[in-house]
Amino acid sequence: MITREDYQRYFWYFFGVLGVVLFWAGVWDGVGNLGYLENPLVSLFIGAAMLLIGGIIRKTDNVNQQELIAHNVLREVHHHPLKHEFHVKYFDKMTKKEILIGGEQLHRLEKGFLVLLEKSGKELFVPIHRVTEVLHQGRSYKKLK
């Protein structure tokens, strides 16, 4: 049995759909009447460019999300009581190779960088987005790329 609340909910669904349709009709007619956009080829190329730009922005969002995941995993390793059982793999841009370092070298995380403490006491800064994998006892713990 359909209740009064159901009728109200369906009314607001219909109201929302009608609003979307009317908005789209306004955009369609409004943009179609702008000077250069009346030409279908110009509209096609501008629309394709907008879609490409949107895809690039979405890909950038994905990179930021991957960096956030990497930061959380590295923070977990840094605070782990047995962090010496972990290893971190990162891509070194200078040597163009993946470097494997022990978890005990992880000194701190700082504004998008992994700070490693070398045996000589020097700090080495590695951008978090270059970390490719975290290993625990030689097995993959988390792949980050």
Image (spheres, rainbow, N blue to C red):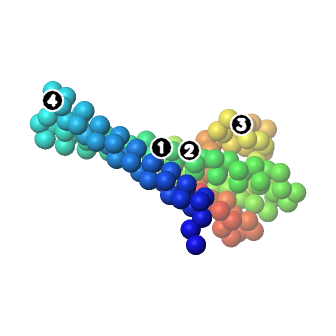
Spatial CA span between label 3 and label 2: 16 Å
Residue behind mark 2:
64
SS for callout 3: strand
Spatial CA span between label 3 and label 1: 21 Å
Q: Please report the residue visible at 85 percent of the width from the left and 60 percent of the height from the top.
A: 82
SS for callout 4: helix
Pointer 2: residues within 10 angstroms few (<14), some, or many (20+)? Answer: few
Residue behind mark 1:
60
Are circles 2 and 4 on residues that touch, CB within 8 Å? no
Pointer 1: residues within 10 angstroms few (<14), some, or many (20+)? Answer: few
Q: Say which label, 3 or 1, has the lower sequence index.
A: 1
Q: Amino acid at mark 1?
A: Thr
Q: Amino acid at mark 3?
A: Glu
Spatial CA span between label 2 and label 4: 37 Å
- Label placed on residue 36: 4
Q: Which of label 2 and label 4 is nearer to you?
A: 4
The answer to whether 144 is drawn above or below residue 139 in the figure is: above
Q: Please report the residue visible at 51 percent of the width from the left and 44 percent of the height from the top.
A: 61
Q: Say which label, 4 or 1, has the lower sequence index.
A: 4
Q: Say which label, 4 or 3, has the lower sequence index.
A: 4
Residue behind mark 3:
110
Q: Amino acid at mark 2?
A: Asn
Image quadrant holding the C terminus, namely: bottom right
Are circles 3 and 1 on residues that touch, CB within 8 Å? no
Image quadrant holding the N terminus, namely: bottom right
Are circles 1 and 2 on residues that touch, CB within 8 Å? yes
Spatial CA span between label 4 and label 3: 50 Å
Q: Which of label 3 and label 1 is nearer to you?
A: 1
Spatial CA span between label 4 and label 1: 31 Å
Q: Say which label, 3 or 2, has the lower sequence index.
A: 2
